[in-house]
Image (tube, coloured by chain):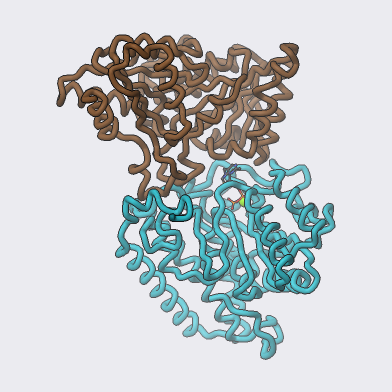
């Protein structure tokens, strides 16, 4: 579902043409509807463990991926369904993984937090906060060493910023000039801890400056703004191996995980309602309608198409068997 | 006596320790406003203020390192790491500094701190959220490694750990947090560290367990009694390190047979040390090799296969029968 940036034919107001606009809306809606179904399945006990929903943050993954090439890499933390789907993984296999079934992306042995897809260069979910930032730097090193011109996007939350690995990676990427785009999804909370209570200097993008990494803040609820900022960073990284730190100002509408559904202790209902006025999907849809790039009928078609694909994913996951018992012992070492 | 689950019992221990001693602090991610991932520190910040119940940034190495510094000058920090699987971010502070200050300073400094961590299976999540890593800490000289098996001993052991002059790693089985309620006396109560308890007396064989596996061992003992007419003794270690070798040896001298049960992976796990200690102390009494029932030597898999990894009653019963038939 990832599309390369199409140039030409752009509508003057928005900077994208109707085809791209439609794709962006479709991709965001797919993630939203996919996760709404996943939440239902969790409530029914079909998905176990922890399930962290990306609802509200879709513009970041979709805007970002829309300017990547299929051979670029992406790596993420544990709130990664959206990143994985945006990068092009088959929703059926993602849902099957959430269900812990054998046809899942990780053979049903990983689940929600450990999605990996070699075919799309999606390098996984990581449940340890901050741990994948140096890994992204290493991938950047390998790209450069092997003479490639790909880039890697590393998504992480505001919660990773106080961890040492954030700072270690930022320094390393700048020092070694690595094509890594560090994309902080600042949704203002790490579980129940707000950015203000965690960071002495809460403007995250400024940390990049300290290390000489070109940095900027972007409205993470505006898919086009994300797209433009990432496009700039990608160009620099491809051409000059310059890393970037982007801070996307975003918000999660659901709790930290399905076990924290309300998220009410650390934030107010009013705040959540206010943030819903910035819903990236609603805003973008209205913008497209106003600009005449889409008609109401097109929106209905997109909705229908997306909900069919999600239903198909659920049916696929439901039908897939559990991984066989002996799989407990496979994939630990190379099989002799 | 009020009946409490393990979460409430631990909360009571923290509350009483903080009330008694102004040097006791609580430090960790989301322990204050949120009251902790599993709510063990619920309401403490409201009662004792944010200077004593400290919401730290998401930075485990800083939590433990800072606590070591606090402890050097007489404070008694009780740190929380949200899941034991996240403690590798601060492992070097625990292993290199927390555990060694007394030895490194030749006794001039000591570290009276406690590190609480939920461990083990039952939340149906994989790897870091379900693993059991007690063997890593038990292996480190200078640390004590404690794992309660129910609300009452959890409360008493945490109280003892907080009063202890040396660092204590305190593992709390997630499977037990809400498993059962027990009567917990209101007046404070401690259980000595380093001492195992006989959870069930028997004569035919010794089942050795700790944490969430004590329940499993007790249920297995019931099955052995009902189906085989066999009377198994169950030892609840409570402290993994220093290991109560005398308790093990005394029991095995009586029964001649032993099976160790733990959630940590089998190889190089606590069971190996326990088996070796039994051989050292009760070799001539042994009628069969000491067996281990443990998690497999694999990273902890996702929820669909959780039950296949953690020891359960049928596996313990089967090992006991094999030991009896040897
Ligand atoms: C090293 C580590 N410490 C603690 C945790 C527990 N934990 C899981 S998610 C989380 C909050 C992270 O917040 P953020 O990075 O902002 O991501 P968000 O959930 O907002 O997407 C915490 C504390 C963890 N997974 N890893
Ligand atoms: Mg966050």
| Residue in the picture at 60% in, 52% down | A271
Q: Residue at x 44, y 21 (%)?
A: B276
Q: Quadrant of the C terminus of chain B?
A: top left
Rendered location of residue B31, percent (x, y):
58, 33
Question: Along the horizontal axis of the image, is A231 left or right of A212?
Answer: left
The residue under the point 70% across, 59% down is A182
Q: Point out residue B165 in the picture as x, y percentages from the top left corner.
A: 63, 13
Q: Nearer the viewer, residue A12 or B69?
A: B69
- Palette colour of chain B: brown
Location of the N terminus of chain B (image quadrant):
top left
Residue B203 image offset from top left, x and y in percent? 25, 12
Identify the residue shown where x is 59% and y is 43%: A192
| Left or right: A1 in relation to B280 | right
- Specify whether B66 is left or right of B206: right
Q: Is residue A82 above or below residue A110?
A: below
Along the horizontal axis of the image, is A44 left or right of B79? left
Image hue for chain A: cyan
Q: Determine the image quadrant of residue B89.
A: top right
Does any portion of residue A28 appear in the rendered image? no
The one nearer the camera, B228 or A74, is B228
Give the x, y percent position of residue A193.
63, 42
Q: Can residue B226 be seen here?
A: yes
User: Viewer-proximal residue, B294 or B168?
Assistant: B294
User: Residue A251 lies in what quarter of the image?
Assistant: bottom right
């Amino acid at each position: 579902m990832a599309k390369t940036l199409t140039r030409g034919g752009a509508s003057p107001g928005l900077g994208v043409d109707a085809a791209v606009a439609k794709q962006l809306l479709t991709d965001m809606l797919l993630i939203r509807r996919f996760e709404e179904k996943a939440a239902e399945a969790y409530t029914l006990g079909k998905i176990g463990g922890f399930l962290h929903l990306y609802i509200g943050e879709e513009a970041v993954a979709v805007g970002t991926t829309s300017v990547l090439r299929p051979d670029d890499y992406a790596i993420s933390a544990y709130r990664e369904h959206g990143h994985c789907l945006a990068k092009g993984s088959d929703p059926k296999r993602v849902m099957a993984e959430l269900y812990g079934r054998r046809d899942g992306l990780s053979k049903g042995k990983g689940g929600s937090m450990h999605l990996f897809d070699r075919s799309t260069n999606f390098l996984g979910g990581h449940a340890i906060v901050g741990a994948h930032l140096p890994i992204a730097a290493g991938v950047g090193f390998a790209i450069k060493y092997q003479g490639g011109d790909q880039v890697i996007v590393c998504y992480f939350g505001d919660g990773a910023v106080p961890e040492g690995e954030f700072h270690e990676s930022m320094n390393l990427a700048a020092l070694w000039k690595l094509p890594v785009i560090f994309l902080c999804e600042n949704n203002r909370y790490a579980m129940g801890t707000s950015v203000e209570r965690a960071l002495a200097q809460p403007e995250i993008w400024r940390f990049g400056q300290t290390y000489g990494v070109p940095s900027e803040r972007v409205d993470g609820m505006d898919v086009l703004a994300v797209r433009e900022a990432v496009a700039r960073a990608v160009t620099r990284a491809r051409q000059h191996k310059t890393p970037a730190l982007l801070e996307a100002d975003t918000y999660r509408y659901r709790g930290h995980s399905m076990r924290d559904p309300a998220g009410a202790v650390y934030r107010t209902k009013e705040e959540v309602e206010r943030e819903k006025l910035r819903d990236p999907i609603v805003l973008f849809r209205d913008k497209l309608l106003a600009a005449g790039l889409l008609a109401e009928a097109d929106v209905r078609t997109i909705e229908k198409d997306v909900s069919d694909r999600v239903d198909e994913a659920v049916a696929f996951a439901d039908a897939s068997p559990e991984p066989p018992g002996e799989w407990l012992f496979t994939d630990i070492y190379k099989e002799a | 006596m009020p009946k409490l689950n393990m979460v409430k019992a631990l909360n009571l221990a923290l509350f009483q320790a903080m009330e008694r001693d102004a040097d006791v602090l609580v430090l960790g991610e989301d322990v204050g406003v949120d009251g902790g991932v599993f709510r063990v520190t619920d309401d403490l910040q409201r009662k004792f203020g944010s200077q004593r119940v400290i919401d730290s940034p998401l930075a485990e190495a800083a939590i433990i390192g800072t606590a070591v510094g606090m402890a050097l000058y007489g404070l008694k920090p009780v740190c929380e790491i949200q899941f034991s699987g996240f403690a590798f971010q601060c492992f070097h502070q625990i292993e290199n500094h927390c555990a060694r200050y007394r030895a490194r300073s030749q006794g001039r400094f000591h570290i009276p701190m406690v590190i609480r961590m939920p461990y083990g299976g039952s939340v149906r999540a994989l790897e870091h959220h379900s693993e059991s890593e007690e063997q890593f800490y038990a292996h480190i000289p200078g640390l004590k490694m404690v794992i309660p098996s129910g609300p009452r001993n959890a409360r008493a052991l945490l109280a003892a750990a907080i009063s202890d002059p040396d660092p204590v790693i305190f593992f709390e089985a997630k499977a037990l947090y809400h498993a059962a309620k027990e009567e917990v006396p209101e007046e404070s109560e401690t259980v000595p560290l380093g001492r195992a308890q006989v959870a069930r007396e028997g004569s035919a064989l010794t089942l050795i367990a700790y944490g969430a596996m004590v329940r499993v061992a007790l249920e297995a003992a019931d099955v052995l009694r009902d189906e085989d007419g066999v009377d198994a003794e169950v030892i609840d270690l409570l402290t993994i390190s220093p290991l109560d070798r005398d308790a093990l040896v005394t029991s095995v001298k009586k029964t001649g047979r032993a099976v160790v049960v733990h959630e940590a992976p089998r190889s190089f796990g606590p069971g190996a040390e326990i088996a070796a200690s039994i051989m050292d102390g009760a070799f001539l009494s042994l009628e069969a090799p000491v067996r281990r029932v443990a998690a497999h030597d694999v990273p902890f898999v996702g929820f669909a296969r959780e039950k296949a990894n953690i020891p359960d009653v049928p596996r313990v019963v089967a090992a006991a029968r094999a030991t009896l038939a040897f």
